[in-house]
Image (tube, rainbow, N blue to C red):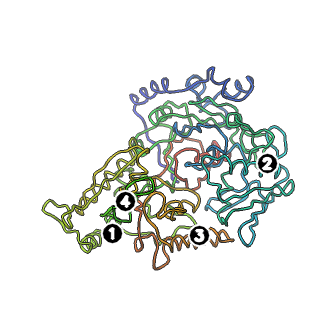
Amino acid sequence: MRYQKKWRVTAALLAAALAASCVTGCSGGQENAETAGNTEAEGSKGTEGAGTAESGSSQSAETETRDSVVVVMGPTSEPEAGFDPAYGWGAGEHVHEPLIQSTLTVTTPDLKIGYDLAEDVQASEDGLTWQVKIRDDVRFTDGEPLTAEDVAFTYNTLKDTSSVNDFTMLKEAVAVDDTTVEFHMNRPYSIWPYTMAITGIVPEHAYGPDYGQKPIGSGRYILKQWDKGQQVIFEANPDYYGEAPRMKKVTVMFMEEDAAYAAALSGQVDLAYTSAAYSDQTMDGFSLFSCETVDNRGFNLPAVPAGETDENGVPIGNDFTSDVRVRRAINLAIDRQAMIDHVLNGHGTIAYSVCDKMPWYSKDSEAAFDPQEAERLLDEAGWKTGADGIREKDGKKAGFTMLYSAGDSVRQALSEDTANQLAAFGIHVTVEGVGWDTAYDRAQSEPLMWGWGAHTPMELYNIYHTRPGGKYAQYSPYSNGAVDAYMDEALACTDLEASYELWKKAQWDGGTGITQEGDLPWIWLVNIDHLYWVKDGLQVAEQKLHPHGHGWSIINNVDQWTWE
């Protein structure tokens, strides 16, 4: 992550922002009492100094006590189903630490595994049993002790009901005694500690249908107030078993990007998400904070010829991209750094895989921009430049339609930049925005601009492994038995860190894999930096590599933030 110097804002821009903030700010109302899940007294306490538009003019975040912070995230960061781990809190597409609940393990700054509730984790030789010893000094915020029964209840409940996590590998969780839980697996799963790092533990005695609205946990923070569509207020858990949070109060507001920018300009908030489009703007009293990520963008290239359909009649395959020489040429023809400079205003890193910078990343994935070799490969594949500059073969033009999710300006810009770059090599790309209701099906025969990136090797598995019971991988037609075998062996490995080498071999083993010298069924472009405006004096703690999703990851360690 990087800080950039602060700039000054013109008086006219500031005035406009102040006006905008009065419109887009949020304040508590009748909904507070209905949704916060707190007593009236607690709700009143939670609203004071929250940084809403109503209070901002008289009491901005700048004049609040120096143990509170107001953060702005995008509207999609608000958990629709509430703060229940079974329905996406801490998991799902945008993985983060659940804050309200404790987890058995955590990911360390180098994205290996550390302990939270766990004191010891052991796997059996066959990989079918995991035994976890937990602390005996942890209580939920209602005063009840947290025991292995709560851990087993949480996992069994999520196994049966989770709408976001895959728990098919888990057969049953069993509490052996108050401080020992065993996980009995349906199949070996070496990366189980990464699942344990995002699964918040809920209390068996206080779990029900409305838990997400009124969560009870044992984590660093307590949910004090939730004004749906507006803000969430957290307060430090006074009985937390770990180091006491330095930030006693954390207010998270949900705003569209332009409103978030205006709120920062007006001084109502302390940290606000932004994008590369705003990165060249000026703002007095704020610095641009940049976090490196594995939030990557790239596109699939269907690796089999056209002509098949799946069980639902969806067309599969693409005659142009099914030639591996074409896929390799496309990979070498893209100048990723130029793409970062032009599309992201310099705020990104080159992506070579879906797991860049992770412990299981293979450097064999790297391939430098090489226009001469790209031209040679296209020539070798029989695609010759026609009179109109577009390559041809057997009477067909070289090219494809590049799909992107309609409304996503960054993916659109990356798609258009890809089209412009490939045009120089005689490949004609038509760019089309589509909805996700059709995108998945169309990606079986046409490239689609995707966003991926998670703190688990399962991201590799989900993209490249042949779908169980199917002929090809799930998101794009591709299959390689050797790649599958390495990933299966990695999951069956009883030593987590030893499994990293097997994940690397799945990427390239010297003879086969998914890299430039291998099958290359996906092209990776950039990892998008997560950008934030940070008020002067706020010290944001060192960030781990952010996964996909520009939201909750920034406050994974908000308890360690300080004010100068």
Distance, label 1 to label 2, CA atoms, is 53 Å
Classify mark 2: helix, strand or loop. helix
Q: Earlier in the sequence, mark 4 or mark 2?
A: 2
In the rendered structure, which amino acid carries the disc numbered 2? Asp
Q: Earlier in the sequence, mark 3 or mark 1?
A: 1
Label 3 crowd bin: few (<14), some (14–19), many (20+), radius 10 Å = some
Q: Earlier in the sequence, mark 1 or mark 2?
A: 2
Which residue is labeled 1 in the image?
323
Which residue is labeled 2 in the image?
150
Label 1 crowd bin: few (<14), some (14–19), many (20+), radius 10 Å = some
Which residue is labeled 3 in the image?
488
Where is residue 288 drawn, in percent x and y?
48, 45
Distance, label 4 to label 2, CA atoms, is 49 Å
Label 4 crowd bin: few (<14), some (14–19), many (20+), radius 10 Å = some
Residue lying furthest bottom: 511
128 with respect to 515 (left or right): right
